[in-house]
Image: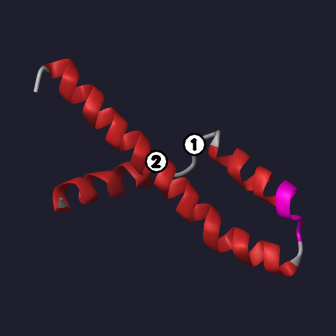
Amino acid sequence: MCDFEAKASYFVYLAHYVLFMGVIDTTFLELFGESQASLCAHYLICPLIKAGILIAIYRLYRVIRAKAIGR
């Protein structure tokens, strides 16, 4: 498990600013406005959403790669 977390964190580091990730910021601000509370929530919640999406992509990549090489 620790090996997966280390590799996943490296993947998140490498891909932390992918073009579609800006859509999450824009959508969040359009939905909740730009009040002080909304900006604080944006600061705390959006990175967690982005990291979750990237970890899911990495897990999917590992499954597809394992099937491709026959493991």
Instruction: Find residue 11 and report its horizontal and vertical position in percent.
Output: 37, 48
Kind of residue indicated by mark 2: Leu
Q: Which mark is residue 18?
A: 1
Residue 31 among those drawn in magenta: yes
What secondary structure is marked by label 2? helix
Where residue 1 sits, quadrant-wise, is: bottom left
Colour scheme: secondary structure
Residue at image location 25% in from the left, 27% down from the top? 65
Q: Which mark is residue 54?
A: 2
Give the class, few, some or many, for how many residues have Cα within 10 Å of label 2's Cα (few <14, many ≥20): many
Residue 56 among those drawn in magenta: no
Instruction: Find residue 39 and report its horizontal and vertical position in percent.
Output: 78, 73
Camera-side mark, 2 or 1: 2
Residue at image location 64% in from the left, 39% down from the top? 19
Task: Name above or below for residue 27 compared with residue 58.
Answer: below
Tell whether label 1 touches label 2 (CB within 8 Å): yes
